[in-house]
Amino acid sequence: MTSPAPTKPTPSELEMLRLLWQSGPATARQVHQAAQAARPDMNYATVLRLLQVMHTKGWLTRDESARAHVYAPAQEQDALQTSLIKELIHKAFSGSGKALVLAALRGGHVSKKERAEIQALLDQDK
């Protein structure tokens, strides 16, 4: 039985989650191959152990019906991102979503294309 997921995954766990959200359910070998594209130094044993730990923590589900276990995120990407953003807003921005958005816009973290998408979204709400 898995224990409840902690409030936030580690950077390495987030990397594995991103790979699984992009690819869909995958074996450790498939995740390892995808991880090597960004981090050639990542070895198979590390990926396998990380997936096993994440399963124990409740971040991943594991289908054990085949010889090679298939891992999948236990939570949708949007749900986890929303949870992480809420925590960030609370901790770093005193609960102000506006302060978070302004920091992102001022800090150069938003491209012109992304600004246009944000503006279109804001215009829809008018």
Image (cartoon, grey):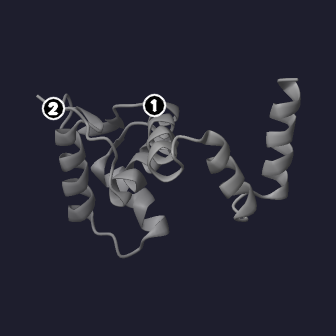
Task: Say above or below: 69 vs 49.
Answer: above
* Residue holding disc 1: 76
Q: CA distance from mark 2 to mark 1?
A: 17 Å
The residue pinned by badge 2 equals 2
Badge 1: residue crowd in 10 Å (few <14, some 14–19, many ≥20): few
For the residue marked with disc 1, what is the amino acid?
A: Glu
> Residue at 48% across / 66% down in the picture?
37
The answer to whether mark 2 and mark 1 are in CB contact below 8 A is: no
The foreground one among 35 and 76 is 76
Which quadrant of the rendered structure holds the C terminus? top right
As rendered, which of 28 and 20 lies closer to the eye? 20
**Viewed as shown, does residue 107 lie left or right of 19?**
right
For marks 2 and 1, the one nearer the N-term is 2
Would residue 111 be visible to someone looking at this image? yes
Q: Is residue 52 left or right of residue 1?
A: right
Q: Is residue 84 above or below residue 1?
A: below
Image location of residue 115, percent across then percent down: 82, 49
**Point 52% across, 40% down: residue:** 95
| Outermost residue to the left | 1
What residue appears at the point 16 percent right and 40 percent down from the top-left corner?
56
The amino acid beneath tag 2 is Thr
Element class at badge 2? loop
Compare residues 33 and 71 and report the one nearer the observer: 71
As helix, strand or loop, the secondary structure at mark 1 comes to loop
Spot occupied by residue 8 in the image (x, y as percentages of width and height): 34, 46
Image quadrant occupied by the N terminus: top left
Does the image show residue 68?
no
Residue closer to the observer: 83 or 45: 83
